[in-house]
């Protein structure tokens, strides 16, 4: 959430590196439903905010930028990162 947990990209990168996931999806908070009673519209980051924050995490992590999606109509604002050196086909093979 913008202004709340979109800080400390170096610390987020350290946490991600320690947990070693195959993929990381940086997603936006959406100002909908009950959250409107406890948050403000300004806490909802825009897609460029998500991309910028994910790119800051990439600088400190073992991950590279894979894709970026913005589907405002379906409320999906996200940036996906992939473990550097890991191909998508390798990831999918290991799931079978």
Image (spheres, helix red, strand yellow):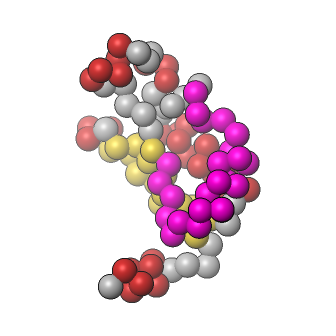
Q: Is residue 37 visible?
A: yes
Q: Is residue 82 left or right of residue 56?
A: left
Q: Residue at x 66, y 35 (%)?
A: 7
Is 54 displayed left or right of 56 in the figure? left
Quadrant that contains the C terminus: bottom left
Q: Would you say 18 lies left or right of 30 here?
A: right
Is 49 rendered above or below residue 64? above
Residue 66 appears in the rendering? no
Residue 25 shown in magenta: yes
Q: Position of residue 52 (x, y in %)?
A: 61, 43
Residue 12, relative to residue 34: is it above or below? below
What residue is at 58 percent from the left and 33 percent from the top?
A: 5
- Furthest residue toward top: 37
Q: Quadrant of residue 60?
A: bottom right
Could you say which quadrant of the image residue 86 lies in? bottom right
Q: Residue 24, how many percent across, how many down?
A: 51, 58
Residue 6 highlighted magenta (yes or no): yes
Is residue 62 placed above or below 6 in the rendered structure? below
How far across and down, in percent of the image, does residue 46 sit? 47, 33
- Count of residue discs: 0
20, 83: nearer the viewer: 20
Residue at 42 percent across and 34 percent down: it is 29
> x, y (%) of residue 30?
37, 31
Q: What is the magenta range?
A: 4-26
Q: Nearer the viewer, residue 56 or 33?
A: 33
């Amino acid at each position: 959430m913008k202004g709340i947990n979109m800080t400390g990209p170096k610390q987020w990168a350290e946490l991600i590196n320690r947990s070693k996931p195959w993929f990381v999806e940086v997603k936006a908070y959406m100002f909908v439903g009950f959250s409107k009673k406890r948050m403000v519209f300004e806490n909802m980051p825009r897609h460029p905010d998500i991309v910028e924050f994910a790119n800051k995490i990439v600088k400190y992590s073992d991950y590279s930028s894979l894709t970026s999606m913005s589907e405002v109509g379906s409320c999906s604002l996200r940036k996906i990162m992939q473990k550097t050196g890991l191909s998508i086909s390798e990831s999918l093979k290991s799931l079978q």
